[in-house]
């Protein structure tokens, strides 16, 4: 949904009719999973997809029927002979879709607030009622919660300003990075907080990581002391490109509890200086590239400078999953695989303590 929100806002601001179609619950084999979204416009065009095939065509047909002022509805599709994929295969699953023509001002306000949260990178959770009988709530009611579980706005939920217990009992903390969930007739669709990735070193590996990380929903910042290595041409998707010496830039760089730091500079001394300035800053993750010998030498130096061994045990070094990487792009893939595993699961491929034992630390 995140990628469709700017286009949705553009239509709302211009007053052009649009229907928002959200896949809220699936069972069995389906072409898309809960969270997929599609916008349908009055001229019959669309943005996004629910998986194609007859289901998408029927959702579009129903959207056009209510787009100029009808009520939101829940559409249920059994993927049998009537609703197969484009290639004729039958999935055998079930899909439930909310079709919302945004006819109520509160519905438009709801999506404006969702867009604010998404564009800022902050997380939130939507709770959408798709089964009124099971939940004992109004079908198509929507509740939007911030990252702390505070109810921000609701649609078609009656006059009560508080979220019902039936909604809250399955609301999961975003720090757990939950997946979409359907429970007791309510779909929970989390929009996870975007994590910042600070790449120290704009060389070949840093550049490859930067390209992949942007597509994996990291906000990329890159730092290098060589201005020609942090250009827009080299890092077209970076949020920030910072040129300056490590000692000047890193001490004042904002590091939050959701920041990932990756050290991939061009040399031992630069790596050591970068780690010195990042290791005690409260980042969610700090990783450094390099051989076991280089890492041991750097850790020895930092302990001599007063960095606690316990702190160094939290550094992921050498960074990346062991996939037998040989090329720059393979190294980047191994690094991003570890970052995504850490972000989504709270773990990485190799425990740091086991690595340090291997280094004799």
Image (cartoon, rainbow, N blue to C red):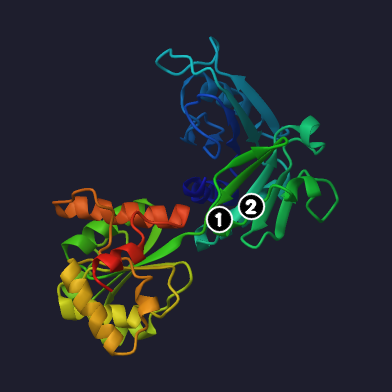
Label pair 2/1, CB-CB below 8 angstroms: yes
Q: Is 135 on the left-hand or right-hand side of 182?
A: right
The answer to whether any part of residue 244 appears in the image is: no
52 shown above or below 211: above
Dot label at residue 312: none
For the residues labelled 2 and 1, the Cα–Cα distance comes to 7 Å
Extreme top residue here? 81
- For the point 50% across and 24% down, the residue is 29
> Is label 1 in a helix, a strand or a loop?
helix
**x%, y% of residue 16?**
58, 42
The image position of residue 46, as x and y in percent, is 49, 34
Looking at the image, residue 156 lies above or below residue 299:
above
Front residue of 15/311: it is 311
Q: Residues within 10 Å of mark 1 (few under 14, many from 20)?
A: few
Q: Which residue is mark 1?
A: 176
Residue at 47% over, 59% down: 194
Rendered image: mark on residue 172: 2
**Residue 146 picture location, percent across and down:** 64, 59
Image: 250 above or below 134: below
User: What kind of element bears circle 2?
Assistant: loop
- Where residue 93 sits, quadrant-wise, is top right
| Viewer-nearest residue: 164 or 105 | 164
Q: Is residue 190 left or right of residue 302?
A: right
Question: How many marks on residues?
Answer: 2
Spot occupied by residue 254 in the image (x, y as percentages of width and height):
42, 78
Give the residue at x 28% y 74%.
361
Q: Residues within 10 Å of mark 2 (few under 14, many from 20)?
A: some
Camera-side residue: 37 or 360?
Answer: 360
Q: Would you say residue 125 is visible in this rendering?
A: yes
Which residue is most to the right? Answer: 159
Tell me: residue 14, above or below residue 245.
above
């Amino acid at each position: 949904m995140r990628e469709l929100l700017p286009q949705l806002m553009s239509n709302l601001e211009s007053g052009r009719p649009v229907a928002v179609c959200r896949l809220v619950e699936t069972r069995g084999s389906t072409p898309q999973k809960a969270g997929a979204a599609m916008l349908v416009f009055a001229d019959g065009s669309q943005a996004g997809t629910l998986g194609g095939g007859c289901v998408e065509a029927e959702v579009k047909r129903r959207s056009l029927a209510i787009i100029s002022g009808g009520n939101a509805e829940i559409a249920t599709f059994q993927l049998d002979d009537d609703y197969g994929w484009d290639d004729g295969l039958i999935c055998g699953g079930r899909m439930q879709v909310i079709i919302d023509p945004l006819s109520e001002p509160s519905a438009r306000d709801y999506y404006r607030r969702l867009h604010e949260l998404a564009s800022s990178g902050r997380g939130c959770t939507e709770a959408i009622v798709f089964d009124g009988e099971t939940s004992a709530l109004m079908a198509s009611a929507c509740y939007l919660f911030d990252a702390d579980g505070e109810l921000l706005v609701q649609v078609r939920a009656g006059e009560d300003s508080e979220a019902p217990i039936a909604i809250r009992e399955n609301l999961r903390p975003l720090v757990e990075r939950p997946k979409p969930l359907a429970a007791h007739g309510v779909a929970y669709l989390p929009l996870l907080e975007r994590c910042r990735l600070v790449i120290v070193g704009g060389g070949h590996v840093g550049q490859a990581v930067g390209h992949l990380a942007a597509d994996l929903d990291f906000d990329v910042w890159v730092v290098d002391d060589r201005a020609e290595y942090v250009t827009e041409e080299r890092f077209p998707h970076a949020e920030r490109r910072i040129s300056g010496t490590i000692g000047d830039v890193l001490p004042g760089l904002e590091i939050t509890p959701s920041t990932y730091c990756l050290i991939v500079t061009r040399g031992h001394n630069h790596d050591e200086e970068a780690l010195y300035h990042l290791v005690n800053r409260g980042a969610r993750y700090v990783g450094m590239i390099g051989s076991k010998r280089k890492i041991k030498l750097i850790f020895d130096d930092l302990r001599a400078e007063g960095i606690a061994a316990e702190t160094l045990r939290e550094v992921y070094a050498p960074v990346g999953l062991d996939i037998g990487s040989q090329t720059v792009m393979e190294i980047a893939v191994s690094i991003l695989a570890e970052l995504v595993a850490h972000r989504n699961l709270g773990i990485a491929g190799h425990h740091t303590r086991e690595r340090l034992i291997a280094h004799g630390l």
